[in-house]
Image: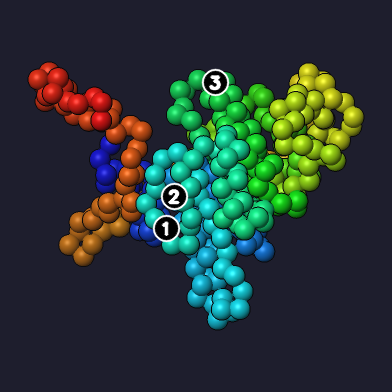
Amino acid sequence: MGKASRDKRDIYYRKAKEEGWRARSAFKLLQIDEEFNIFEGVKRVVDLCAAPGSWSQVLSRKLYLPAKLSAESKECALPLIVGIDLQPMAPIEGVIQVQGDITNALTAEVVIRHFDGCKADLVVCDGAPDVTGLHDMDEFVQSQLILAGLTIVTHILKTGGKFIAKIFRGKDTSLLYCQLKLFFSEVTFAKPKSSRNSSIEAFAVCENYSPPEGFNEKDLHRLLEKVGSPSGADDLDCSSGWLEGPNKVYIPFLACGDLNGYDSDRSYPLPKAADGTYQCLEPVQPPIAPPYKRALEMKKASSHGLQDLQNLNLDT
C-alpha cells in the first residue's frame, strides 16, 4: 500500500501526521478523555509501554504544556509525566523517560522516586503484543500484559486513581473485568471512534482505585485466583455461572468519541492542492530502535542477492 493510499484509507493516520502526533493512537486517548474526563485534577501520571510516544504527547499537550503556559505555573508545581518502555523514545517536552520493564518492581521504585515519594493520579497503558491473528491466543497474551501493568499499578497508583489499558475482547473478557473490579469500584470497557470496528481492540477504563482491605502487593497473583463476581457477591469461584450460560453478566461497554465524526474503517478523498496534486506527509517521529529493524535490514539485503545477506553483520 502506497503512502497516499494509506492516507486515503486511514483518516486517523493522515490526521495524526497533519496535527503532529507520532501515531494515530493519540486520538484514542483523546476520545476516552472526552467521554470520561480522565485528566481532571491529574498532577502525576505514568504512561506504560509508552514508545513511540503518542499517548505521552497527549499527556504533555493536555497536562504539562497548559500548566507551563499558565500564569499560575509559577505558584504551583508543574504536572509530572513519566513514560516507561523497554524501547528508547525520542524526547517529548515535560515527559521523563524511563527505559525499563513494567513487570519489574524496581521500575515502580524509579517512578516513585521521580514523584518524590508520592503516587500517581493516573496510569495509562496502550501496550500490546505482536498479534498472531489467532484471537484466543492474542486475547490471552494481552490479558497477561494488562495484569503485568496491574502489578506496577498496585505499587504506584494512589487510592482513588485511574487506570486506562488496552484490552482485546473475547470469551474471557468477563474474567478480566472481574479481576479489575477487585481493585477499582468502576470498570467500563470503551471503544473509541478512532479504533477500527474490524479490530477486537477496546480499552478498560478503571476508576477509583480501592484495593481490598489489607492488600499486599506481593499477594497480587494469589488474590487474582480468587475472583469475585461482578455483582459483588461473595462467590470466589472463577468457574461460576456468571462467566457463561443464562447467568452470564454482561460487561458495561461504551462507544466514545463523536459518533458523527470520522469513520476509522472508511476511505476518504485526499485533499488536493491548487495544482490538483496531493502532498503526502512523512511520519512525525520514526521509531528510534524498533525491534523489527534487523528483520527489515535482512529483507532488504536478501532482495539484493545472497552475497549481501552473507555480508550482513547479524551480531549488531
Kind of residue indicated by mark 1: Ile
Q: CA distance from mark 3 to mark 1?
A: 34 Å
Q: Quadrant of the C terminus?
A: top left
- Amino acid type indicated by mark 3: Met
CA–CA distance in space, label 2 to label 3: 26 Å
Sequence-wise first label, 1 or 2: 2
Q: Is residue 200 above or below residue 280?
A: above
The outermost residue toward the bottom is: 71
Name the foreground residue: 183 vs 96.
96
Q: Dot 1: few (<14), some (14–19), or many (≥20) neighbours within 10 Å?
A: some
Q: Position of residue 230 (x, y in %)?
A: 81, 34
Taking the spot 51% from the left edge, 37% from the top edge, the residue there is 101
Which residue is rendered at x = 67% and y = 64% of the image? Answer: 41
Residue 271, percent across and down? 30, 57
* Three-letter code, disc 2: Gly
Mark linked to residue 92:
1
Tell whether label 3 touches label 2 (CB within 8 Å). Answer: no
Q: Element type at marker 3?
A: helix
* First along the sequence among labels 2 and 3: 2
Q: Which label was assigned to residue 137?
A: 3
